[in-house]
Amino acid sequence: MAQPATHWLLHLETLRPYLSGRDHRGKKGSLRWLEAAIAERGGKSGTVRNILYKDLGAPEEKLRLFEVIAELYQEAGLEPPTPPVELGVESARRSLGRDKRRILRLFTKALHQGQCPQIVVVGGAATGKGVLLSAVQKAVPKSLMVNLGGELAQQLYPLSERLGVQERLEALLAQFSPTQPYALKAALQGELRQALAEAINRQGLPLLLRAEADGQLSGLPLRNLEGERVGLSVWLEPLLGALSVPYLVALTEPPPTLPYQVLSPPTREESRRFVKDQLPDLPAERVDALVNQAGRNFGELQRLVLLEIAMAAAHTRPQAKNHSADLSQDPKLRPILQALAVLSPEADPAVPIPLLEQALGRRLEQLSQAERALFQPVGEGQVRPTLRNLLPTHIPEKEAQRLHRLALRYFSGGNLFRQLYHARGANELEFLLELLAQDPSRLSLMPGLWAESAGWSRVAERQRRGLDGPSLRERLATILVRYRAVLGQYAHPEALEALELLTQSPDPELRIWARVKAAEAQIDAGDYARALEEAPLEPELQGEVEAEGLLVRAALERWRGDYARAEGYVRRALALPTPPFLSDRVWLWQGLVAKDAGRFEEALEALSRVGHEPLLVGRARYQMGDLLMRIGRAEEAARHIREALENLETHHAPQEEIARVRARLGTAYRRLGQYEEAAGLLYQAIQEAPDPFTRTRAQSEASILESARGHPWEALRLAAEAERYLRTTPERPSEARYRHLRTRLRLATAYWVAETNNPYRAPFRGGGKAPKALELLEALWAELREEAASSDRYTALRLDTAQMLALLKPAEEAQILLRPFLGLSDAYHRTQARLSYAEALCRSGKWGEVLAQLLQMDPTVNLPDPGLRAWRIALEAQALLGLGQEEAARRRTLDACSLPEPFRAQVGRVLGALWPVEALEAWIGTLAPLTPADALAIWLATASHP
């Protein structure tokens, strides 16, 4: 394929695949479209063809065409091409005054002719030195642009990197000292000038240099070869004399011997031309506003224009041509831009005005218009950057640390985030680690700190207060492991790397502590056997590691079923001095041990005292909710578990934990009769569970919900899938064993629902036939009778199994089966057993004994579980019917109207089948075509009754 005849056609060929559509000018990017666009801008449309195909045309016409093409590139999301040199000259010529145009023409013409022009111009602060050099740079893009003023070291570093003499510069600057004789300082500065001159000559590019009146090197005054203190113009003259490359140097003060030309201040018309060239689409009133703000100060005008360009780019307004709007290159704006970049972190961007003034060494009223445009007020006595993308991303290390140290002192009385942020930026690692050790969760405010710590140097180690003890990185590793442990993220790559570092520590106490956390990780994963291997022995637990080690021992004893010993370990840990975050862990474990042992009030008290670390608080609320559900307080349970779920989601708990808690909340809603809400939560938990064990647990709980809804097939499918996994998994054997037994009960329940055509919902009525359910329940019951009474949940499982089995046994056998449970210590379990026993008595027709059993219970209003209330109402009404007291039975049945709808319907279904038909019709009206059971169920579920 032939190359395009001109670079203009090459630009269009690159652009055409991205252009589409038409407008009033025609097809976008076509010759006719370009001619119309040029005419609209006051150009000659007839010149477009000659420029495109022959590169012939006046410079101003070429510049117009290039601007149009550049705008098309920007619209297409492409980087505009570099303008030809002649266009840079034309653009500069249009915006400069007469004296600056002459210097530009003189310098560029000499370069074009192969000469080596060396020109010095001198002008004050408002004469447009920077504008002239920027114009020359556009005309000579392959040049070396340098701005010098103030602390020269900061400006010479990037220059030395580009010239390849960074190491030489650093070596010379390292020798500077305030105590040196003036002659030695002068000699070192002379050596530095010579090194720079040689490097500039070696590179060979034209030098464009702008210099302020004064400067310093590493905080020391500039000196000439005689050791005398001098300004920047005098200091630079030997360097300029040693150069063999072309240069254009703009000085603020005249050099001692070099010839120079004087720049005149810009006229108002020159200022307007400059703004219009840089921002051709800017409205005229805005152009005049910028000129008025700058006065006759061309440097200030250039800064205001740069700021306007940057803001236009930030708001995606293609105002400018292919300009660089790096404001930090301007020595006047650099200090405030660097200060705002350091003192205004994105997470907390407000900068107190006194702090900013300290950083700048000036009051805000003394700042120029351009400087003040870089920030805006936010609240009383604070400012923030006008646009964050104007701030520099790289700040010299010494300056950044100076600003961070200044801010650290300012915020020493408060604002934890700022203390952490600025301690990190100032490299005050000792102080940073002290703050983090007080509360490891603060690491969440310091992303990337662990990776950064790999580069902490030996210099940083000198901040340590003594030679003994852990290194700074080892101290961070302990904080990091504690932080990840609270999140349950033991397998996080950072946690694993930190633990590996600690296991290799020369400090024996750290090695022991690392083993404690490794055992804790195995416990969290349910691998207690592996944890037993990892955990240090009790005699090894000394010093700060003792409390955490004792909690690990408590967890292992809890797994073994030795609750007394587990509690002993927890009490010993509780007696030790512990920081707040570890106290929370101690209270959490004490609550767990008490909960498993069936001491519910003590467990609730301990769990309620967890109140420091958000994730541990969430876990404690979950355990409280789970416990409250076990004792029949389902409404309170749902409230606590809902709070726990919100907490854990907010603080990014592990997905497994969130799914588990969500499933348990679904079970709480099932207990309350809120089946739709329960289904949403349980099926979401199944969907989001990150591992088979968690998913199986949610499936098992969803199975019992489907049984309660009267959906036996769905219940059977869920329970069968869960049972198959739990029967074969090697994961968490102790937990899997309990879950498998519980799931077998739920599988039998699904068959009971299918075979009796009753939902699994109180009030229950026995006497039905369910052969498969009976077979499964008898096998399970035989196994449970052999199982050691290891915890309260096994007691609950035995009771639940006995209750289901009693529904399928003859009345007398059911009474014998249930009688041992009437003496249970837990009131909720005892109430459940008494209701089941009363149901068996009803089937025997022992109405007086039924009422006697019910009278031994708390009043119905004190039963917080709606299922238990429903069952008691139905049993009492049934006994009253059996005694012939139909009116009393009717009144008692109406008490069901306060229950959730599923329980009202179930009360109607059970009692409707027992009520004499004529009496029922006299009460609720004609029954046909419904059965009496369905008629009373619908009547109670849907009507409003007094």
Image: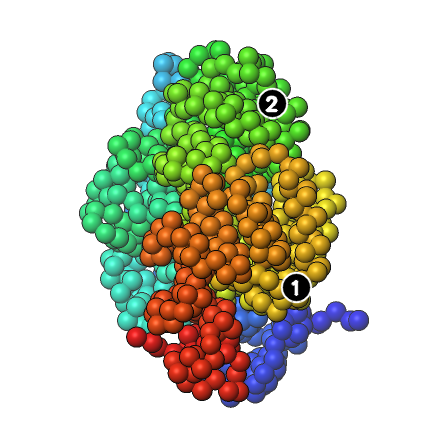
Q: Between marks 1 and 2, how big is the CA–CA gap?
A: 53 Å
Sort mark 2 into few (<14), some (14-19) or many (20+) by Cα contacts within 10 Å.
many
Does the rendering let one see residue 641? no
Total number of numbered discs in the rendering = 2
| Residue 582: quadrant of the picture | top left
Residue 127, label in figure: none
Q: Quadrant of the N terminus?
A: bottom right
Q: Foreground residue, 223 or 877?
A: 877
The x, y position of residue 44, in whole percent, is: 50, 82
Q: Foreground residue, 288 or 650?
A: 650
Q: Earlier in the sequence, mark 1 or mark 2?
A: 2
Left or right, 630 with respect to 113, comes to: left
Q: Are marks 1 and 2 in contact (CB under 8 Å)?
A: no
Q: Foreground residue, 281 or 377?
A: 377
The residue depicted at 58 percent of the width and 34 percent of the height is 790
The residue depicted at 68 percent of the width and 43 percent of the height is 782
Q: Which residue is mark 2?
A: 535
The amino acid sitting under disc 2 is: Ala
Residue 769, label in figure: 1
Q: Is residue 21 above or below residue 753?
A: below
The residue depicted at 52 percent of the width and 45 percent of the height is 819
The x, y position of residue 707, in whole percent, is: 59, 63
The residue depicted at 28 percent of the width and 62 percent of the height is 291
Q: Foreground residue, 183 or 428?
A: 428
The amino acid sitting under disc 1 is: Lys
Q: Is residue 886 above or below residue 724?
A: below
The x, y position of residue 462, in whole percent, is: 46, 17
The x, y position of residue 109, in whole percent, is: 53, 56
Query: In front of the other: label 1 or label 2?
Result: 1
Does the rendering let one see residue 882? yes
Sort mark 1 into few (<14), some (14-19) or many (20+) by Cα contacts within 10 Å.
some
Q: Quadrant of the C terminus?
A: bottom left
